[in-house]
Amino acid sequence: MAPADAVSRGTPRSADLQVRGFQASPLLIPGQVLGRPTLFADSIAVAGTALLLGVAAMSYAHQDPATASAPRVIEVVVKRFAFEPARIEVTEGERVRLMVKSADGPHGIAIKKFKVSQALKRGDQPVSIEFTAAAAGEFPILCSEYCGEGHDDMKGMLVVTVKER
């Protein structure tokens, strides 16, 4: 079929289509045409993308920084008959990672309110304990493994302050 025949039969040639704003694609079957989206379709696509990006940005901006960030890391050394530091202060809702190690023998660490209970062996490697300080108040830190005559006096304090809103 000659190019002139194609135009007369209603099948446009590639050159005719490019003038009208269409392109023939090498991936299409001969005679198929890939049309350009209209201004309306372009506008809808741009508006939809902007809306999705805006919603994503707003949800990120309203996320609680205490839960959005990595946990706060606090190093704790347990030894006869004390916790160092003896007082740990965090904010309500804050994620906390205690890196606890025993300096002198078997011990344990327990914070009952946040269901923390971990036995510790003497060693150089700290044990990682992660929790969220979900309630404000003062909570005792106790040794959960008998460690000698001063065991009952071995106490620390976790102080969780109210989050400002």
Image: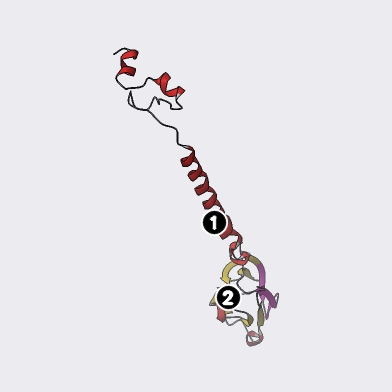
Q: To which quarter of the image does residue 123 belong?
A: bottom right
Is tag 1's residue or tag 2's residue first in the polypeptide sequence? Answer: 1
Residue drawn at 55 percent across, 74 percent down: 118
* Rendered-image quadrant of the N terminus: top left
Q: Position of residue 146 (x, y in %)?
A: 58, 82
Residue 160, horizontal then vertical, whole percent: 65, 77
Which numbered disc covers residue 24? none
Within 10 angstroms of label 2, few (less than 14), some, or many (20 or more) residues? some
The quarter of the picture where the C terminus appears is bottom right
**Prevalent SS, magenta region:** strand
Say which of 93 and 80 sits in front. Answer: 93
Type of amino acid under label 2: Ala
Rate crowding at label 1 as few (under 14), some (14 to 19) or many (20 or more) other CA atoms within 10 Å: few
Q: CA distance from mark 1 to mark 2?
A: 28 Å
Residue 94, placed above or below residue 152 = above
The residue labelled by disc 1 is 55
Q: Amino acid at mark 1?
A: Val
What residue is at 41 percent from the left and 23 percent from the top?
17
**Residue closer to the observer: 28 or 33:** 33
Circle number at residue 134: 2
**SS for callout 1:** helix
* Label 2: which secondary element: loop
Q: Which residues are magenta?
A: 74-91
92 or 118: which is nearer to us? Answer: 92
